[in-house]
Amino acid sequence: MPMDKPYFLVLKDTQMGGLDLFMSQKQGINWSVPQNLGYPINTQDDQVALFITADGQKGYYSLEQDTGERYKKSKLVEITLPNSLQAKIQATTYLKGIVTDAKTQQKLSAELELVALKPSQTVGKFLSDAKTGQYISVLNTSGEYALFVNKQGYFFKSLHFDFSQTHALDKVLNISLEPIQKDAKEILNNIFFATNQWDLQPQSTTELDKLVVLLKSNPTLSVEISGHTDDVGKDADNLILSQKRAKEVMNYLVNKGIPSNKIKAEGYGETKPFVPNTSDENRKLNRRIEVKFL
């Protein structure tokens, strides 16, 4: 359970009687003193195993009642949580989508890895369904994420998104995987540079290391690493910057054991935009590193 969410537990209560549901919350490195959820959730009977729905509005628990015999009688109870309790519960948000073959649209079973970028750490690994291609994962905290998708015989896909819990909406990312073949290309969405700089930022290593694994598993293939910019600044400066960034990526791969004769680094400046340079969002998409199989 995420450490910033309420934690529900069952304790013996001396005032209301029986087993009651309590709530405790993380406070720094400690937990708060468990608080009885009170009536009408708790009564003189035993309440156990509270489950809260994803929207944080309803709850279900098992009501254990004495029968006067050897065994207790259990009943599933549905409740609408009091507003005071709903305010303390963060609604669950999901990352979900469908993985398909980019050429045939066939649904694919693929390995997915969700990585929080600041700091860089894996928060989940899961599979998409072989029949439907669907996947789903819980997004516990706000921040920047990378999603890596791998399947043997395909170029791995990397996606980057900034998730804000203030909107509490599910994030939907449908993913198309390109088969590994000549002229197949992919944008590396999790390669980061400072403005007008070509030094790789630390959070770029996760994606680059996955590219290293891919190239080592396909040793007969050669690749082109291409750098691209938006249209801000002088054409000549953008061309030089894109060349230096592509070369920096190539140097990383060579230092990780990829033969230099298998890699070609090219800079195209602003000459090959991915989308029109008509907005800040589009310009961000045009500042990119691409990999192409030769």
Image: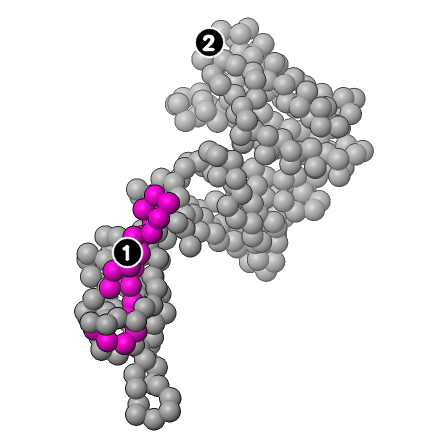
Question: Circle 1 sits on which residue?
Answer: 33
Query: Residue 182, image x and y in percent?
Result: 73, 33
Task: Find residue 151 and report its horizontal and vertical position in percent.
Answer: 65, 47
> Would you name the residue on which mark 2 appears?
233
Nearest the viewer among 114 and 218 is 114
Res. 61 visible in picture: no
The foreground one among 19 and 48 is 19
Image height of 13 relative to 177, above or below: below
As displayed, is residue 136 above or below residue 51? above
Q: Looking at numbered disc 1 in the image, what kind of residue is underneath it?
A: Val
Tell me which residue sits at (56%, 29%) in the image: 204
> Residue 268: which quarter of the image?
top right
Q: Position of residue 47 (x, y in %)?
A: 30, 73
The magenta stretch spans residue 25? yes
- The span shown in magenta is 16-36
**Which residue is farthest right?**
220
Q: Say above or below: 20 vs 33.
A: below
Q: Amino acid at mark 2?
A: Gly
- The percent position of residue 169, horizontal first and vertical second, equals 35, 47
Circle 1: element type: loop
259 and 5: which one is in front? 5
Q: Local crowd at mark 1 within 10 Å, few (<14), some, or many (≥20)? A: few
